[in-house]
Amino acid sequence: MKMDKLDDYLKDIEIAQEKTKGFLTIYKGLEIEYWDSHEEYYTMLEQKVDYMIHGQHYVIRNNDLSKLVSSFDLTTVEEIYLYADFMIEAMRSGRFLFHAHPDLFMCGYKVWDKDTEEVSRKILQVAKETNSIFEYNANGNRRGSVMTPLGKQPLYPRIEFWSLVKEYGIKTTLSSDCHQPHLLYDDTMKDVEKKYNNLELNDVGIIKL
């Protein structure tokens, strides 16, 4: 969403809040990237919304926003470590209610090896230190799959990463990440919910604002 659409977005939420007053609570929220050069921007947004979700869909080198690399397409060791750096900075900022699809870096770098494990452990160590909440994201199941030594898996969530999430005791939440209303609790979401429950993660349930 471009900045010139933000006020319309917030106004639409306010209209919905008024229409559902008394039987449904609607909060204002945003899912956004994290760049450590944009602190004033985040402070401004915090005054307009009830919460912000962190989703690192891009990484950049040398703080150059003209050279974005999609987190869906990371293919080199250098890039996945760069992804870890942005995740760590976002968690340490303390600005976000939770962190969406933290294992997104494995969409492009699909192999579980010593580097993906080290990147995961770097991220999870800081998550533990900062008491961060990680989202188990159902939408990855709609984006294709990959064959792994542990069998066929969605591009994300990846069981290798989430087994480490359990090992570290990281707080987690389940989300449909629905981009359309009918995907809120569809068959894919129900299947992912079963997988999530079977992992017996440190589930925080409904996050209180």
Image (cartoon, helix red, strand yellow):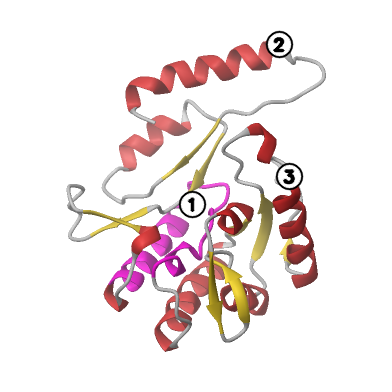
Q: Mark 1 points at which residue?
A: 94
Give the residue at the far right of this rendering: 23
Whether the residues at callouts 2 and 3 have beta carbons within 8 Å, the answer is: no
Q: In this view, does 24 lie above or below 62?
A: above
In the image, is 197 to the left or to the right of 87? right
Quadrant in which the N terminus is drawn: top left
Residue that appears at 37% across and 59% down: 71
Helix, strand or loop at label 2? It is helix
Magenta stretch: includes residue 59: no
Q: Choose the circle earlier in sequence order: 2 or 3.
A: 2
The Cα atoms of the two marked residues, 2 and 3, are separated by: 26 Å
Q: Which amino acid does label 3 sit on?
A: Asp
Judge whether residue 86 can be spotted in this image. no
Query: Toward the viewer: 93 or 6?
Result: 6
Q: Mark 2 points at which residue?
A: 19
Q: Mark 3 points at which residue?
A: 186
Residues rendered magenta in the picture: 79-108
Residue that appears at 81% across and 16% down: 22
Give the percent coordinates (x, y) of residue 174. 69, 54
Q: Which amino acid does label 2 sit on?
A: Lys
Q: In this view, does 42 lie above or below 166?
A: above
The Cα atoms of the two marked residues, 1 and 3, are separated by: 32 Å
The main secondary structure of the magenta stretch is helix
Give the percent coordinates (x, y) of residue 50. 57, 32
- Camera-side mark, 2 or 1: 2
Location of residue 197 (image quadrant): bottom right
Give the percent coordinates (x, y) of residue 208. 71, 42
Helix, strand or loop at label 1? It is loop
Whether the residues at callouts 1 and 3 have beta carbons within 8 Å, the answer is: no
The Cα atoms of the two marked residues, 2 and 1, are separated by: 33 Å
